Amino acid sequence: MAVIALDIGGTKIASAVCMPDGSMLFARKRLLQGRTGTAVGTLLTEQLTNLLAAARRHGIVVDAVGVCVPGIASSQTGRVWAPNIPGWEDYPLEQELRAATPLPVYIESDRTCYLSGEMWQGAAKACHSAVFIAVGTGIGAGIVVDGRFLHGAGDIIGATGWMALQSPYQEAYAACGCFEYYASGNGIGARAREAVGADKTYRGVLRRKRVARLTAHDVFAAYQAGDPLAGEILGKAIKLWGMAAANLVSLLNPQKIIWGGGVFGPATRFLDDIYQEACRWAQPISIRQVEFVASQLSGHAGLTGAAYLAIRQTQEAPLVHPQPFT
């Protein structure tokens, strides 16, 4: 058997025919190039149709389609909310894909797909309880406990960017949440622009760049060069990453927390510091049982996870075989 995996991002669609051993055939990427709304849906169905045709030409039987979306996927309606794709505030994605193929279609959020991929082919193999913290443009978490992915009442579980980690409340948190405001890729870049603009005496590395265009990438590069302001900004992020992880460890008692997304990456070097910060806040027995690790799948976690979710549903197999702590 084989499945087709589709990984939708804010700027591209990755797709492949995936085999049960994890190997990928006919992998390809298409840039969205400013497409919005139904134009993105059309591009997606074209990718699906092309892969189905390629599989038929090579005698490969495809049994299902797995889809990773950058937002919320409603299991009740098959509709999705993807904030980085204009026109996808309540988009009928499942209906559109089912019009293109009679195969079963399984749609999940990117954070759930990331963790699914890590449990199949990456850093969370053999885990029955784990959390994937995706730190990129925003922050989200995929969560599996006792071999079951958690979704919540409206499939919105894991919106960790809204974790309340600092008092008092500021109106600036309303758009993305307190945690994301300081510690996402967008947040780190914005706090750098804010800090450089506010400190007229600062003459460090970040001052030499166009302040209005400073990004998290610039902050990490400045940190590497010993810039003190970059150190302050990333120091704040490290504290909040540690506090957020501590809360998740105390609530969920996972075996592993996997850190991924575009920021991890360069922030992987801080995992020991993040763990030490988490140790200050977390339930003391749980924090000793958990391991903080970086993603092993890099940019392929969403595609791999979408494939595995479809394979697992088709085979009606359990996600993992629960194992006791050792």
Image: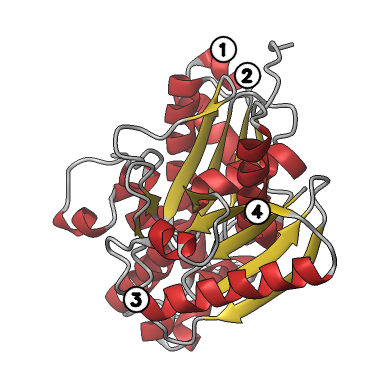
Which comes before the other along the chain, label 1 or label 4? 1
Q: How many badges with numbers are in the image?
A: 4
Counting residues from the start of the chain, the first of labels 2 and 3 encountered is: 3
Q: Label 1 vs label 3: CA separation?
A: 48 Å
For this rendering, which residue is in front, 126 or 234?
A: 126
Mark identifier at residue 288: 2
Disc 2 secondary structure class: helix
Q: Quadrant of the C terminus?
A: top right
The type of residue carrying mark 1 is Ile
SS at mark 1 in the image: helix
Viewer-side label of 1, 3: 3
Label disc, if present, on residue 37 of the rendered structure:
3
Determine if residue 272 is in view: no
Residue 303, position in %: x, y? 64, 57
Q: Quadrant of residue 323?
A: top right
Dot 1 alpha-carbon crowd within 10 angstroms: few under 14, some 14 to 19, many 20 or more: few
Residue at which label 1 appears? 285
In primary-sequence order, the first of circles 1 and 3 is: 3
In the drawing, does residue 32 fall left or right of residue 76?
right
Question: Do the CB atoms of the residues marked 4 and 2 lie less than 8 Å apart?
Answer: no
